[in-house]
Amino acid sequence: MRCGPHGRTPRIVYAVKQRLSHLVEHNPNVDEVIALRDGEGPLAYARRLRAARPSVVLDLHGKIRSRILRALLPGVPKVVWHKRDFRDTLPVKLALRPYHASMLFADRYHAAVEKVVGRELPKGKLQYFLGPDDLAVADAALRAAGIDPHRPLLGLSPARTGPRSAGP
């Protein structure tokens, strides 16, 4: 997103658990990562989030923890991404029917950002940005497992279909 609703480039602050912060901290499009520290409670974390003075909150999680944090950020407009319609939640949670996503996660997140800015935006390319030591750490882990990091890795993720596709 190059231009916010007022023609300015928005400052993007990402709030995420400490153990997941490496997934976004090297992204050049993210200005700051405010990581939830181990043992940190919602009041202390919300205080640190308020210090960033957000103009809007885009909740890409939509669960109880983020609902609490949203409540602790009064006066800030919020857009919440929803995995599924509330009416689908109970039958899926009770395993009465399998969950079928209506669109890909990246598309849902993109739609949530469009809702924040109030207009359609061009779709970008889904990317992961490595930190300076990430490749060396990954190579060492592969070597320790007896895998040559210079040979191709093949990942398989076949989709199951049929009436029992929700199971393992």
Image (spheres, grey):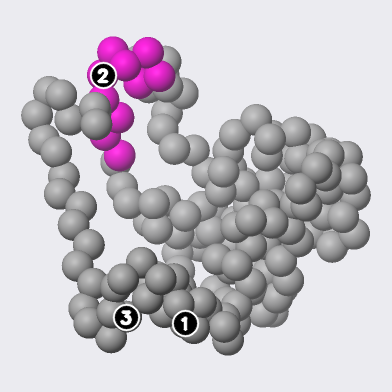
Which stretch did the figure color magenta? 92-101
Residue 167 shown left or right of residue 105 in the figure = left
Which of disc 1 and disc 3 is earlier in sequence?
A: 1
Disc 2 to disc 1, C-alpha distance: 41 Å
Q: Is residue 5 magenta?
A: no
Residue 110, position as x, y percentages in the image? 45, 59
- The quarter of the displayed image where residue 39 is located: top right
Residue 125, position as x, y percentages in the image? 38, 75
Above or below: residue 14 compared with residue 141: above
- The quarter of the displayed image where residue 62 is located: top right
Q: Determine which residue is flagged by label 1.
A: 135
**Three-letter amino acid code at the position of disc 1:** Leu
Q: Are marks 2 and 1 in contact (CB under 8 Å)?
A: no
Density class for disc 3 (Cα within 10 Å; few <14, some 14-19, many ≥20) is some
Which of disc 3 and disc 2 is earlier in sequence?
A: 2
Please tell me whether mark 1 sits on a helix, a strand or a loop: helix
Q: Determine which residue is flagged by label 2.
A: 97
Residue 74, position as x, y percentages in the image? 84, 41
Please tell me whether mark 3 sits on a helix, a strand or a loop: loop
